[in-house]
Image (cartoon, rainbow, N blue to C red):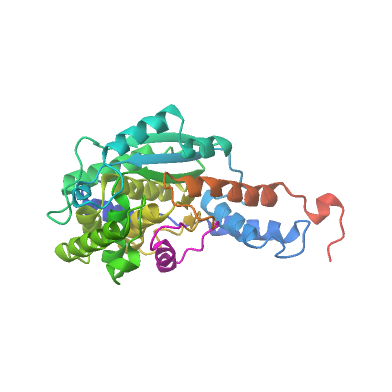
């Protein structure tokens, strides 16, 4: 399906046309939940997740049968500043690993029954070093948003977006600082494992990039400080909202891409939950800014969509209990 936007301005307008959840479905799901064979509230947050999911799918008794995992890959010119422990060539090598089925995200996607697709975005043409110039032209940023949008299968009933891109924790930290303020050190972590001097360089790079591209426009923040894979994730998350597909957000990089949408349009992430709390840098701070409570906290910092893919199991459990448990009447159990 062709993306319904051709500029950042029209993408902004597209965000403003997205529909909300189905209130009738939520009410009916809540009524069903009250009749299930368990004490009220005994399944805790699983009950809230089921009602949330039912509202976005427009049915009080939903099923999850077609999850989709999208992994986007991009290369970053800011790597020239020595911000990563690995060279940019690793991005290409890892894309090959994804396509051969050898990465962690492949195993998790298969385990939870998700269709996984990989999209490499101009890996031979890295973004510009954002300490020197905007990372992307408007044309390149829009093209990446469109790639993400069109990658979403309208028939999917759950979406996870992941990424691969050496240097992209630096880009994510710059996005977070530009969107929410604070100090660069608040948002900047060790990424793939830089040492103390590497971390200091990374913090200085984030400071320099944010200072050079000062703007209140979230989409301009994405263009100037982001990467193609981050823009593609933002496009995919926005498309999921358009199609009524709930989203599980991955770690710091995915959340930074999603934060652009949250800042650009109020409520733009109402269809999304946080899959996990990453061990990377400022992810906890970023989730707090987004008002998202993570489903899992396992010390993960791999990226690829891995933490969110693992959380598919939690959401599947919530929906299985909600939709497949017997009510008191069906089970012949006395209610209260």
* Residue lying at the far bottom of the rendered structure: 182
Query: Quadrant location of residue 199?
Result: bottom left
Q: Is residue 206 left or right of residue 18?
A: left
**Camera-side residue: 212 or 51?**
212
Q: Is residue 14 left or right of residue 77?
A: right
State how many labels appear: 0
- Residue 207, image x, y percentages: 22, 65
Q: Residue at x 40, y 29 (%)?
A: 99
* Residue lying at the far left of the rendered structure: 132
Residue 53 visible? The answer is: yes
**Camera-side residue: 88 or 50?**
88
Q: Is residue 319 above or below residue 90?
A: below
Q: Quadrant of the N terminus?
A: top left
33 is within the stretch colored magenta: no
Magenta region: 278-296
285 is within the stretch colored magenta: yes
Query: Quadrant location of residue 288?
Result: bottom left
- Residue 59, image x, y percentages: 59, 49
- Residue 261, image x, y percentages: 34, 57
- Residue 23, image x, y percentages: 54, 59
Residue 6 visible? The answer is: no
Q: Quadrant of the C terminus?
A: bottom right
Q: Is residue 90 above or below residue 311?
A: above
Q: Residue at x 21, y 35 (%)?
A: 124
């Amino acid at each position: 399906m062709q993306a319904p936007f051709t500029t950042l301005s029209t993408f902004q307008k597209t965000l403003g046309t997205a529909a909300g959840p189905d209130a009738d479905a939520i009410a009916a799901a809540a009524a069903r939940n009250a009749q299930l064979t368990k004490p009220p509230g005994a399944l805790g947050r699983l009950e809230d997740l089921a009602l949330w999911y039912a509202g976005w799918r427009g049915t009080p008794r939903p099923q999850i049968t077609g999850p989709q995992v999208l992994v986007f890959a991009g290369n970053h010119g800011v790597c020239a500043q020595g911000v990563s422990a690995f060279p940019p060539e690793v991005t290409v090598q890892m894309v090959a690993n994804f396509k051969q089925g050898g990465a962690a995200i492949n195993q998790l996607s298969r385990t939870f029954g998700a269709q996984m697709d990989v999209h490499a975005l101009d890996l031979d043409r890295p973004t510009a070093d954002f300490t020197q110039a905007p990372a992307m032209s408007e044309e390149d940023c829009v093209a990446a948003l469109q790639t993400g949008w069109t990658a979403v299968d309208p028939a999917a009933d759950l979406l996870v977006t992941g990424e691969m891109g050496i240097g992209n924790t630096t880009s994510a930290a710059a996005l977070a600082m530009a969107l929410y303020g604070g100090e660069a050190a608040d948002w900047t972590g060790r990424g793939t494992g830089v040492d103390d001097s590497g971390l200091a360089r990374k913090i200085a790079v984030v400071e320099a990039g944010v200072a050079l591209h000062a703007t209140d426009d979230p989409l301009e923040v994405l263009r100037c400080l982001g990467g193609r894979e981050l823009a593609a994730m933002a496009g995919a998350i926005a498309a999921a909202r358009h199609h009524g597909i709930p989203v599980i957000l991955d770690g710091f990089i995915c959340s930074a891409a999603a934060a652009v949408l949250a800042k650009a349009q109020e409520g733009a992430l109402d269809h999304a939950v946080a899959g996990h709390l990453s061990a990377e840098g400022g992810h906890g701070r970023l989730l707090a800014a987004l008002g998202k409570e993570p489903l899992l906290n396992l010390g993960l910092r791999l990226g690829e969509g891995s933490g969110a893919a693992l959380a598919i199991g939690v959401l599947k459990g919530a929906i299985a209990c909600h939709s497949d448990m017997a009510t008191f009447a069906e089970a012949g159990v006395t209610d209260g």
